[in-house]
Every structure is written in C-alpha cells, then in structure tokens.
Image: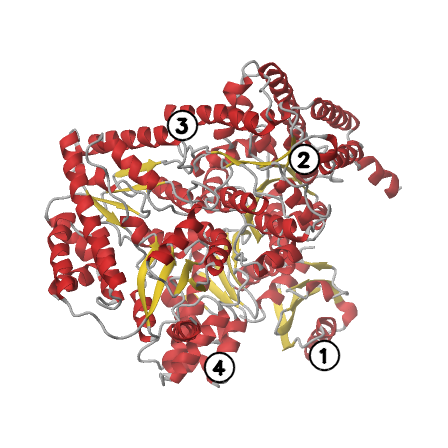
Amino acid sequence: MIYAGIDIGSITAKAALIKDNQLMGTHVILTGYDPINAGIKVFEALLKKTQVLKKDITAIVSTGYGRASVKFADKAMTEIICHGTGAYFINPEIRGIIDVGGQDSKAILLNASGQVENFAMNDKCAAGTGRFLEVMANALEVELNQLGDASLNADKPLKISSICTVFAESEVISMIAGQEKRENIIAGIHDSAAARVAILASKIKIKEPVMMTGGVAKNKGMVAALENRLGFKLIVERSAQENGAIGAAVLASKL
Amino acid sequence: MKEITIFHDAAKDLPGVAARIKAGQKKIIGFLCSYAPEELIYAAGFHPMRLFSSKSEIVLAEQHLQAYCCSLVRGVLEDSLSGRLDFLDGTVFPNTCDTIQRLSDIWRMNGRYEFFADVILPAKLNTQSARTYMTEVLTGFKKDLETAAGKEITDVDLQESIRKFNLIRKNLSKIYALQSQNPGIIKGADLYAIVKGSMVMDRDEVLDLLPAIVANLERRDIPQKSVKRIVVSGSICDSPDIYTALEAAGGVVVGDDLCTGQRWFEGEILADINPITAIASRLLDRVICPAKHSSPTARGENMVSLAKKNKADGVIFMLLKFCDPHAFDYPYLKEFLEREGIKTLLIEMDDQQQNSGQLATRFETFIHMI
Amino acid sequence: MSDKLSEKRKIKSAKKMRDIMTTYYIDAMTAGQNNKQVAWITSGGPVEPLVAMDIIPVYPENHGAMIGASKMGEDLCIKAEDLGYSSDLCSYARADIACAIVKGGPLGGLPKPDMLICCNNICGTVLKWYEVQARYYNVPLFILDTPICHTRYPPEIATYVRTQIDEYIVFLETITKRKFDYHKMAQVGKLAYEAQLLWQKVLNTTAQKPSPMSAFDAFFFLALIVTLRGTQTAVDFYRELLEEMEQRIKDGISMVPDEKYRLLWDNLPVWYRLKWLSEKFSDHNACLVADTYTSAWCGAIKYTDENNFLDSIAEAYTRIYLNIGVDQMADQVLDMIKFYDADGLVMHSNRSCKPYSFGQMDIMRIVREKTNIPVLMIEADMVDPRNFSQSQIETRIDAFMEIIKQKRL
C-alpha cells in the first residue's frame, strides 16, 4: 500500500511517498502565491517521478501552513507531529528535532516511542527563521545558498544585538557602512538566528540525539552556529527539507 | 581628576567593586529600586549595592520572563541565573511595580542567595495610615536584618548610618547645583558615573571622595560656551553615551527626574526624631516615583517646578521600553510642560537596542528646535 | 436534527443575563436623571459599600471586555496611542482612556463618574489608569492600597487595609453627604457572600463529566458577580443558573458535543476571539471546563465572615489570586487540575496583564513537573487584536491537541 504526505510551507511545497514502510521518493517545488495549486503540482510531479498512479494511493495527509488548501488530502495534521514522525521514521534513535523553516522555527521533544512530548515555536518575529536569513542575504547582496560557506570563513564573528528582523537589518547596514568583512557579518547573523532557536530548545529541555530538519538545514553555517549554541552535534539527513512530508506520509499509513 | 576616575571604574565594573567589598569581609545586599532602605542595610553592617543589568544577551531569563518585560528586570535576572551576581549574599525587593513584584517571586523561588526580603512599602504615600504602615514595614525589615547580622541594630548605629547617607546626598546635591549654575562645569558622563558609583561603592569610600570633587568643581573656571539647558526625566538611565551625545549636540543636563538620579538622592533624613520614623518620612515625602501615588498631579507639578528651577530650555523623557508607570504619566507631564512653553522630546530606551546614529540625529534636531 | 441539538445546548439563562446587564447599564447611563451618583470602580475593588450607599458602580474593565468582544479594541487603542500612550500599556486602560475622550465603544462611552474607586489588588496599572481619569474628569479618587502578599498576610497589612476601609467609608460619606448605613451594609454583605457561594457552585458543576458549560460560558456569566455583587438580583440569577446547570447534568446535556478532553484556561480571555477559540477546541472534542480568572470572584469566600462582612473585606480583597506569590498561584492551579481532572492547561500569555502573565513560565514548569500534563502557551492580548496571530495560534492549538490525543491512545 502506498501513502502520501504533502507539506505546503511558506517558501517550498514538498511531497513524499511511502510504500511498505519504505520511502519511495520525494519532491520539492516553490510554493509561490497559490498554495492550492502548489499542492496539486508537487503531488503530481512526485507521482510522475515515481511512476505511481493516483488511484494507487491509499491515503494522504497534508501539513504545513498551507495544509488546509490541500483539498484532496484525507487529513490535515500540524508540522509538529509530522516532523516528529518523519524524524523518528528516518532514525528511531532521535529524541529531539529542531526545524527551521521559512517562517517559523520549532523545537520538538519525542519520547522513546516517537510520540511528541512537548514543543516550542518561535514568537511573532522572524528572527530565527529562513525569512530572516533571506532578508539578511538581500542586505548583503549574497545568494542565500552561499550564506553557509561564507560564515564558515569568518575570522571575527560580529554580534547582532537586536532580536527583531527590522532592527537587525539596520545593524547589518551599519556594519556594511563600517566596512566590516562580509563573512564576519554573516557569521553574526547565523549566531543571532541560532540564539533564537536555541532558546526554543531550552524551553522544552531537548534531549539528544537531535535531528535538524527544514530547508535551513542545508545551510552549513546555520548548522554550525546552532551546534555551537546548543553544545552538541546535530544530525542532518539529506531528507531534511522533506522531513515534514515524509512524516505526513507515515501518519497517512496509520490513519 | 583621579576621584572621578575612581567612580568611572566602579560604574563600569560592578563585579570588581563587589570583589573589593567582599575582601573587606562585608556582606552584600543587592536592590533594584531607589526605595530600598539603604540606611538600614548599612546600619546592619551590610553593603547595600544597587543592581544594574550587564546588558548581556538574554538566554536563561527567557525561561522565566516574556519579551514584554523591561530590560532592567530581564537583564538583572539573566545576570543572576548566569552566576554573574554570585557575589551577592542577598537581595531586598521594595515593592515597586508589577514587574518587580513578579521578579521578586521568581527570584525567591530560585532560592539562589542566602538572604531574601520583600519590603512591601505602601503604594499610597499621602495618608497617616500609609505612614504608620510604612514605619511598621521598616521596623520588620530591621528585625530581618538583625537576624541575618546576628546582632541588634541600635539607634546609635542607625543615626550614624543616617548621618553618612545624608552627607552623601548633600554632596551629590551640591554637585548637581554647581552643574545647574554653570552648565558644562562637569561632563555629563562624569556626573552619571559619580551618581552610579555612589549607589554601588563602599559608602565610606564615597564619603571620602565626594567632598574633593565638590571642592574641585568650585575651583573650576566657569564654562563660557553657550549651551541648551536640558532636564531629563525617566526611570533607569544606565547609558553614559546619552550625556556625551547630548553634549555633542549642544545640550547639557542641568537637572533630572530619574530613578537613578536626583529622585534617588534627594531629600534629607531628619536627625532629631526616631530614626525609623525619619527614614519613613523621607521615603514618603521625597520626589515621587510614578509607581507611587500622592495626588493625581503631584508629578506634573514636580516636573514643572524642576524645569523652572533649573531654567530648562527643554525636557527629554528617557523612558525604558515596557515601563508602564512612566509610560502612563508621559502624556500629562508633556502637557503640563508644554503649557509652560517648555518643549519636550521622547526617547524610548532598551538595553538591547543601541543605535547611536539615530540618537544623535534626534538630539541634534531637538536642540535645534528649542 | 442538528438545529434541535444545538438549541438544547444553548444556555437558557443567557437571555436573562443580557436583559439584566442592559437594565444595569441603562440605570448607570441615566443616573443623573434619577438623582443617583455613579462610581467607577476596579474589578477587584470592594463594591459592597457602594451598594449600601445606593451609588451605582460602573466597571471600566467590564466595559473593556465589551469593547474587546465588539471588536472595537483596535481603533480605540490606536486613538490612545495618538494621545501619547505607549502601545505596550494595558489595552483595557488604553481603550477606556480613548473611549472617554471620543465617547466610543459599544455604549458611546461610560457615564461620567462622580467618584473613582481604585483598588490595586489586581495590578499597579489601575493606579495609573485611575489617576489619568481623575485628572480628566476632575473628580475625587479613593485608593484602596492592598499590599501584595508574596508568602503571607502579616498583621501590618491587615491593619493597614482595615484602616483604609474606614477611610473609604468617610470618603463616601463626604461625597454623598450622607451617613453610612452599617445595618444596610451588613445586609449587602450577606447578599454578596451568598452570590459568591452560588457562583462557586456554578463553577463547580463543570467538574461533571461531560461538563454542562465551558469556561467560555463562565466568561460571559461572570459579569453579574463583578458588577451586581451585593444585590438580590445577582443572588436570584445565580440560583437560576445553578438550577439550569444541575438540570443539564441530569439530562446529560454537555456544552461540547462528545466531550473527550478537558482543559484548564489561565489568564484573562481573548475577548475578541472567544467564538473562534471555543469552536476550535470544540472541533477537537475538547472542553475548557474551568479557568483561573472567573474563579477569582469567589476565591475570597474562605476569608469572608458573612456575619461580619465589613471587617472581612480587608483580608478578602487583599488575598485574591493575583495578589499572592507565583508559587501560591501554582498551588491553586494544581488544585484546579486535580478537581476538574484536566488533561491539559492552556495559558494565555497576555501582553496587557503583567501580574498575571509574568510567572506563567514558572507555573508551567511546576505543572509539568508535578502532573506531566501538556501545557500550551498562547501569546495574545485581551483587547488589542494586533497582538493575535491566528495562523500561528491555530497551529499551536492543533499540535497541542494532537499531543493530548496521542497520550490517551
């Protein structure tokens, strides 16, 4: 039996297929302005990729901010449960998850059976999320996917004191005007974002081993900054970005 | 001047100050509010030390206090939880505002320091029953201190303590008066350091240093430069850069209505009455804090009187973000002052936001306007 | 079929309460014409002496709740900010201060007060708020200063507050130019006590499984115990409401159809989103069976001597839920979790109320340590909707309920 999970995020939409408790495939596209369309598109693209027919899908679970717009899903569940399930599916040793997505970040605590015990999400401001990094990359005229490598080359990471994205941007602009090295500014930005996320982890007393999921996990600089703040290593899988969709598919198999 | 340098060093390095006090075998009792009965603490043989946030990043305090809490309280809690205040032997919490009240609970529940006392002073200061209650609370606090000190606090101890604190206050008032008469005779940042130092340093050392500073100022040449006379109003002002920025823009602070300024040291304790009653009287009668009540217009009248007495060209409100009592008074204080033709400026302050460029712009514009 | 069911679920007493509140506000608005005086009083203030003096009590905080519920909070708060009041200040105060000036809100403004009675047992904000109104209306202000009881209720506080009750009476006599009737006061005291007992009993009915009403209903029915405490009307009404609840229990009518999960709410309501919140939890088969806010109006029963009401006012009004230490508040929350058999705790981190919100994190920690039930924190504001992020809150509620459901399996 084949099950599907669809995760509509603020920046990207992901889909995953599970068959006989094995991951069959995943797909990622940009969400754009139309989440309903994005859900259909990513699902159909994945079906084509894996050569599976729609009628062979037994059940579908949707998740993410746009979960309600996946009209063809059998159930909508939150990203918290889906990320928890996905991480545990990939690696049953996992006891904690840190998910940094486009517009929010979360820390999730699992028990030994893979159930979510507790969670914490960021406040209203974007200071720990993908959106924050996007804004900063813009201010520094750097490609988003270059942020990671850049920060690893810093020799003197700078401190950004504001917790608000708008004020942080102001600070960064002052630093640029003060001709600080780009790498050092970026390292400061990563540390600032990591600090916000680490507070969430503290709130729920996260336990190792911890997996990092969400699109921002591809940013090596962020992973390093987070590990520095948390004081332990994070497990990053190739499926980090699609983790929510994977979890949704697993949950679909349990409906 | 080396005496002033000593104050600067102290103001910048509270742990250093604490270390020297502890080397002298004295115990340190910390406080956050200018209603703390320092004379009683001193008379018990302890060192009263005002606490300021070290402005470190807030990490541990996030587990106890939400972001809509003022940076003084979050910052000091952060320092405590991080171990930076481990030099404290105890703390005293006069009840001030809602935020401090809850900090007191969180602090007490953490149980980090040996001595802890709530001194629940009245919020109303204008009735006989409040006066009686205040006296009883102070008497109770005196007993707590005696238990902690393992000895009685005699009236003689108290009178001696009061004498010293009166002298400190007198000297600080004199320095302020000299600045008001001849604006610029002392740098604002120096004045800030002297006042802050007087709240944290060994009080006997403070008493040694202040008269020398007064004498030195009396001998200085009167500054000829024309400046705008500014009065500052607010709660905690722990940013010496404010004064430097203001002076760069052409203004000098000639008087203030600050919790960490004149409000803290104003008023003398009467010598010839019962010491507890005398201490209570000063707390009841001194320039009022917005978290206390004596009449709906007391603060406004005070503000106008202060501005006039110091011939203020303008008043700058430096309000700590999330400080409710000050924020509630601001609109009417502004109105009272503007009615007298005195222009005002509002600056919202927060430990976490230091944007000197913006501050300079606002000061320059304001000085230009007045 | 579903129409009849939802008709059955509606609480019949609601209509009566609306009528009573309408009459109450009409009386207040026409006080001048009837030669009566109006006093504005804080929600935690001792209203009984006012009732004994035939003064009409008006509650700006109850008005604040109405402003929130009618979704007029945002505009009024913005107006207050235009006047120079920081957007970080309590939204009840901001809305009321603006309302007085623009005569806004659902009633077109509250009737002008002849006097202001401010008791700071609930917070220090009311002191500042009432100073603002004292200046604006230029009327006498009486402050009942009830020092906070972090860990105990010492004799000096008892004496101080009791003395102020006498000062309060002198204040009222001076303004009304009438003598205080101690006999009438004793009668009013008995009625106040009885109403509180009945309110307690009403709140206790939700310990029943399934619960005949929810905290959202309690938020609505709270208004009478706040505004008409000390009157026969309040006693009669709560007696009827109690009977209706007891009948619902007999008939097996629950507020949430198919109640599976029981939750406790902490802090003030999110007045402008009650229906949405109620339906959101109801869709999850969860009933918010009790809350720490509405129970505050009968928490003082244990300190009240119905035969000596005037003397007991001091302790009853000083030792309320918000005027004690955070550890004591946590104990009360633990008691409620046990009494109502709650599966989870929902805490509203209310930007407008520092005494209620600061300490919540420590209470959360204690609840999790002692009971292991899930705790959800919702960041919002009671009247200002600009601090409410529906999408984020929806996700949090869903995730919280998913955890609770998982625990049950």
Instruction: Report the Cα–Cα distance between label 1 and label 4.
Output: 39 Å
Q: Nearer the viewer, mark 3 or mark 1?
A: 3
Q: Is residue C263 above or below residue C378?
A: above
Q: Nearer the viewer, residue B298 or B350?
A: B298
x then y, percent, for residue B197: 21, 56
Q: CA distance from mark 3 to mark 2?
A: 29 Å
Residue position marked by numbered label 1 in the rendering: A48
User: Which dot marks residue C223?
Assistant: 2
For the N terminus of chain C, give its image quadrant.
top right
Q: CA distance from mark 2 to mark 1?
A: 61 Å
Three-letter code for the amino acid on which mark 4 is drawn: Ala
Q: Is residue C258 left or right of residue C346?
A: right
Tell me the chain of label 4. Answer: A
Is circle 1 on the same chain as circle 4? yes
Out of C285 and C171, give the one closest to the viewer.
C171
**Labels 2 and 1 in the same subunit:** no
Element assignment for label 4: helix
The residue at 70%/48% (across/down) is C69
Q: Nearer the viewer, mark 2 or mark 1?
A: 2
Q: Which quadrant of the structure image shows residue B223?
A: bottom left
Residue on which the image places disc 3: C157
User: CA–CA distance between discs 4 and 2?
Assistant: 52 Å
Drawn side of residue B295 relative to residue C348, left or right: left
Dot 3 or dot 2, earlier in sequence: 3
